[in-house]
Amino acid sequence: VTLEPHPGHEKILLAAGRAPSAHNAQPWRLVPLPNGASYELHYVFEDKLDADPDDRDAFLAMGAFYETLLLASHLHNNTCEFVPALAELATGFKLGVVSIAERASSEPADPLASAIESRITNRHPYQKVLLPKGLQTALIELGCTLLEPTLVAPLVSKASVMAWKDRRFIDDLKKWTRFHDGAPDGLTPACLNLNSTDRSALRFALARGRLPAALAWVYARRDVRLTKASSAVAVLSVDDRVPLTMFECGRRLLRCWVTITGAQHSYHPISIVIDQATAPELTRMAGVSHAVAIFRVGFTPEPAVVSNRRPLGNLLMAPQQNEA
Ligand SMILES: Cc1cc2nc3c(=O)[nH]c(=O)nc-3n(C[C@H](O)[C@H](O)[C@H](O)COP(=O)(O)O)c2cc1C
């Protein structure tokens, strides 16, 4: 059976597939339902990361995917609804049902819809200038805690050293780094903004599997430098870490991202601080209950390289056998 999107949804689903995910793993799938308007939304273990044992990054990405789908539907004169119905399957998790419908002329488009196509990860150094007041306020309203980059830099250093000594972190890099430009997923050195020295260093680390402490410290300088070259570091937190809470946080994360790129600024996650044993210290520093996402924000005139996505057909999935 060849799976097709419902009529009229092609553009929306293509735009939704541009959503962000850690390592560009794209762990989302849609199962078309017979009503011609709805899809089950699934997270598949096939694209699970080794360094994400509790599926934190996965559920954040699922939320970011749904919010991208919602904004894309508004951009294309539709609207979208999500009804949660969480179920764990052998293949992954079903999160619920997404339905796309025409948007009534009386319902205004989401103000972020027009900026959805500008969302991108920019890994260049940023200018160390204050964020515009309006952008700061918008991020705080979306639940961000904003921290001084110089305050966070020592923690980034600690996390980065831990990461380069961590086999799981390097294994994921090995699995998802693509040294040829045509790959439909993962990240190329160009996307990662690595120069030729950085590329050789990365190849060396991947070949070694993990780095000794002194070398890990040298590698960590890059993350520290980038953190310091930012206007602010933002932290998102949750009250509990159940899947649907993480999903909702992923929706907020995406709205922060589009708010930033829509304001001609840049966004770059620094997830190592949360993946490593530095997470509790970050949570304390930010004064939140559970820090689950961290990113640096700032301005750079340097454009980022656009990453690839799998074709639309790979986003669609047949109904799962083991479903209740
Ligand atoms: C939950 C999550 C965590 C991420 N963590 C990192 C990170 O630690 N470092 C990084 O450079 N990019 C990180 N990213 C960005 C992804 O690599 C990026 O979204 C993906 O490669 C697609 O590229 P794009 O955002 O430019 O479209 C993260 C994205 C998500 C959604």
Image (cartoon, grey):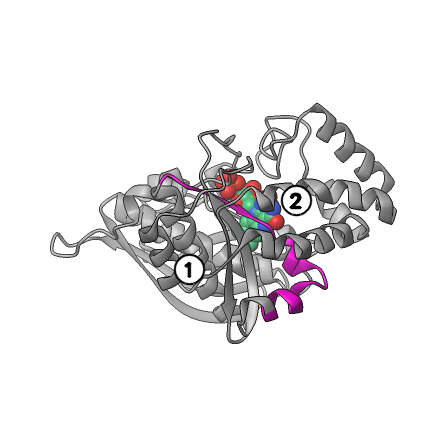
The amino acid type of the residue labelled 1 equals Arg
Q: Is residue 75 above or below residue 103?
A: above
- Amino acid at pointer 2: Asp
Label at residue 85: none
Instruction: State the residue in front, 128 or 58.
Output: 128
In percent of width and height, residue 251 lies at 42, 59
Labels 1 & 2 near each other (Cβ < 8 A)? no
Cα separation, mark 1 vs mark 2, equals: 24 Å
Identified at 41% across, 41% down, the residue is 265
Q: Is residue 105 left or right of residue 13?
A: left
Q: Which residue is mark 1?
A: 252
Q: Which residues are magenta?
A: 264-284
Q: Secondary structure at mark 2?
A: helix
Quarter of the view holding residue 93: bottom right
Residue 194: horizontal and vertical position, in percent? 65, 30
Instruction: Name the residue that disc number 2 marks.
Output: 223
Q: Is residue 302 magenta?
A: no
Residue at 50% from the left image edge and 32% from the top image edge: 304
Q: Residue at x 32, y 42 (%)?
A: 115
Magenta highlight on residue 277: yes
Picture coordinates of residue 37, whole percent (x, y) = 31, 54
- Dot in front, 1 or 2: 2
Query: Is label 1's Cβ within 8 Å of ligand 1?
Result: no
